[in-house]
Image: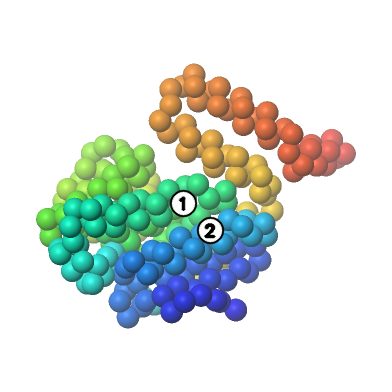
Amino acid sequence: MAEGSAALLYEVVDAVARVTLNRPEKRNALNDELIAELKAALARSELDQSVRCVVITGAGADFCSGADLSALQKISKASVAENLEDARSLMDLFLLIRELRVPVISAVRGRALAGGCGLALACDMVLAERSARFGFPEVKIGFVPAMVMAILRRSVSEKIAFELMAAGEEISAEQALNYGLVNRVWETAEFDAAVVEFAGKFRKLSRSAVALSKRLFYRTDAIAFEEALAAGVDVNTTARMTEDCQKGIARFLQK
């Protein structure tokens, strides 16, 4: 059974931690409470050794529509220091997703807009329902999709990233797939089952190997080729010494 606050639900089923944004009447818009609950849920999954994968999804018709009205009102009245603290809170959420040892998947149905699109793309993988919509409309109110630029520039070409950021237009799930922002797109009728099956594949994989792979993958973002190879040597050596690797090699040799 799912647990959690009114704003967020959390449950672990078959080694998959399912985190559900639970503000459907607000299109799962982000506010301070929901961001704090998301961080707590991710931290909880990190401590649970049975968890092999995290899936973030939204209750109701939409994944997440970005900041809610109260959050926008807070921004308009806040001081520089208060706005800085607020922005850093969202940054901390994106970093936590990257630092989590297990893969984090966003399962997007309906709209993922502004900060909600940033949340979806901050995850390691994005799964989308055919009718899903993605976009960064911040420029339409004089705002900037600032932190998500770091993700966009690493996910798509420079020209596509700039268009998404500067034009503020929504794109379809199919377009997002073609751009490389989305891993898979499924029809509505098969979406839920497909997400469960996709996430379930991590039950059969080595938790330590996936964790080491994820850490190295993101570490190589900002380092030179030779340094990246040297980092790979370190992780390769560490992986060889893990229990999962020792057992896996033994099983392979026995075949």
- In the rendered structure, find residue 37 and report the number of the disc placed on it: none
**Residue drawn at (49%, 19%) of the image:** 226
Q: Quadrant of residue 114?
A: bottom left
Can the viewer see residue 3 in this picture?
Answer: yes
Protein image colouring: rainbow
Q: Earlier in the sequence, mark 1 or mark 2?
A: 2
| Amino acid under disc 2 | Ala
Task: Measuring from the top left, give residue 91's x and y in whole percent.
Answer: 35, 51
- In the rendered structure, find residue 43 and report the number of the disc placed on it: 2
Q: Which element type, helix, strand or loop, lies under badge 2?
A: helix
**Residue drawn at (29%, 57%) of the image:** 86
The foreground one among 138 and 5 is 5
Task: Measuring from the top left, give residue 46's x and y in whole percent.
Answer: 58, 56
Can the viewer see residue 200 in this picture?
Answer: no
Q: CA distance from mark 1 to mark 2?
A: 8 Å
Number of numbered discs: 2
The foreground one among 234 and 160 is 234
Q: Residues within 10 Å of mark 1 (few under 14, many from 20)?
A: some
| Amino acid under disc 1 | Leu
Quadrant of the drawing holding the C terminus: top right
Quadrant of the drawing holding the N terminus: bottom right
As drawn, which residue projects farthest toward the top? 226
Read off the residue under disc 1: 96
**Residue drawn at (15%, 64%) of the image:** 77
**In the image: residue 67, left or right of residue 140:** right
Check if mark 1's residue and mark 2's residue have beta carbons within 8 Å.
Answer: yes
Q: Residues within 10 Å of mark 2 (few under 14, many from 20)?
A: some
As drawn, which residue projects farthest toward the right? 254
Q: Tell me: residue 121, above or below residue 67.
A: above
Q: Which element type, helix, strand or loop, lies under badge 1?
A: helix
Task: Measuring from the top left, give residue 212's x and y in whole percent.
Answer: 60, 40
